[in-house]
Amino acid sequence: MPDALDPARTRDLALGPVRSDGRYVVYLVDAAQRARHNPALEEALHLAGALGVPVVAAFALDAQEPGLGERSAAYLLDGLVDLRDALAVRGVAFAVRYADPATLAHALAPDAAALVLDRGYLRHQRAWRARLAREASLRVREVEGDVVVPVDVVTDKREWAARTIRPKLWRHAEAHLVRPTPQPVAVPAGDPRLADGLPPVDLDDLGGVLAHLRLDDRAAPVALEVGGERAADLRFEGFLNSRFAAYAAHRNQPQTDDVSHLSKALRYGHLSVVDVALRARDAASDAASLDAFLEELVVRRELAINFVAFSEDYDAYATLPPWARTTLAEHASDARDEVYDEATFEAAATHDPYWNAAMREMRATGYMHNYMRMYWGKKVLEWTSDPEAGFELLRTLNDRWFLDGRSPNGYAGVAWTFGLHDRAWTERAVFGKVRYMNAAGLKRKADPDAYVAKVARLEAEAHAADGGRFRR
């Protein structure tokens, strides 16, 4: 097999043969749903060029994927349409099938020379890759393109906090802040006439696809958001040109919009984190804003990926550090001023106008300003009957309503609310020594009343937007 473009990002999961009689190289798309700055795609093209065969990219649309609902599926489908069109320009065929990823890989394997796939960190992603590695009869190469520094280069354990992973990341970051070299397409794929026997997904009928999947529809598709590489690139370019210089000063000011909105695009791999970091570095006019941006993009994000990569129970209460579970248990029976059920939270019907506005922002846009997201989580801890119930509810709401849910950042954020990656603070009722937030703090540090007004404007825009792409 030819040398990898970046050996630190690659590993062979199965050491079967690279078949000289294979009709194509398969790239099984998962974490990197983009046609540019995609190490796995370039690796597949590199190998296919050496063999003189085309590349076929394939995506498994799996209704059983944990937590997949209509909102996240609609955003995903937008991105797949964009990816199909971008791959066609490069001469790469794209096949989307109703299947789980391992089944799709096995169905394409008989005619394949080799299989290339993205690295995934969540439990179900690791599980199907392990199954494929056990059962494959050909070479399976995994390429890690979702981080700046490959996870196993950074450390071999779950890190305690940002302060422990930060020096390890920056020690290696410069060596890996390199865009992959675009590879020529030796043989355009055209129509590869796949004999996989699996039902195809019609990306020209997105409403029909959603109906076929029969997913949880409590969180409807977001009319204001279009998924995909082109839309994400335009949004990021707008941030760099208009709002980046104010990032350090305003990133914790939820009444403003001087943030990047990158979490959604990075969650689906619509943008490359390496490309984002390099573009930010080139565009920066304010050193403090660049430092703050890279801290979130690299340190905090890759701390979250480290957390799920080295934790089987990343979405369970038991994953919390012992000190946090101990202090929360000691205060589990403390009287709560308010206790709300799931329906009240989802309806944004609490007594707190700032919390309600945060929930309404998420309902309307699939996004919540990060400062309010911390406040939102802390109040769920405070207003549920016990900390374990609060943890489960927060995870459920996070996965159902956020476009960047069901992700390392999402699971780390939920657990952070309850003490992960944090230290002990002053002890108080309900929270114990876990960090506390309240409305008075919001008013001291930001302008939450202006935030409430901003959310009202966003709701009006969402109501007026045309969501017809997903009509049945």
Image (tube, rainbow, N blue to C red):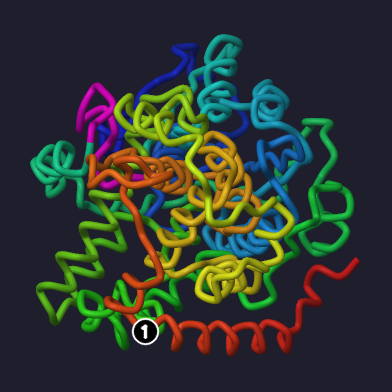
Residue nearest the observer in this picture, 19 or 238: 238
Query: Measured from the top left, where is residue 263 in percent x and y?
Result: 44, 60
Position of the C terminus, as image quadrant, is bottom right
The residue lying toward the viewer, choosing from 298 and 153, is 298
Residue at x 72%, y 50% (from the top left corner): 69
* Callout count: 1
Query: In the image, is residue 154 part of the stretch drawn in magenta?
Result: yes
Task: Give the image location of residue 260, x and y in percent.
Answer: 37, 72
Residue at x 46% of width, y 45% of height? 414
Residue 188 seen in render: no
Looking at the image, is 368 positioned above or below residue 83? below
Q: Nearer the viewer, residue 84 or 330?
A: 330
Residue 320 included in the magenta stretch of the image: no
Left or right relative to 177: residue 337: right
- The image shows residue 257 at horizontal and vertical percentages of 40, 82
Dominant SS in magenta? loop
Residue receiving disc 1: 447
Residues in magenta, as a range = 146-160
Tell me if residue 457 comes above or below residue 196 in the rendering: below
Name the residue furthest right: 472
Q: Secondary structure at mark 1?
A: loop
In percent of width and height, residue 134 lies at 55, 9
Vertical placement of 364 versus 130: above or below?
A: below
Residue at screen point 12% across, 72% down: 288
Q: Nearest the camera: 461 or 118?
A: 461
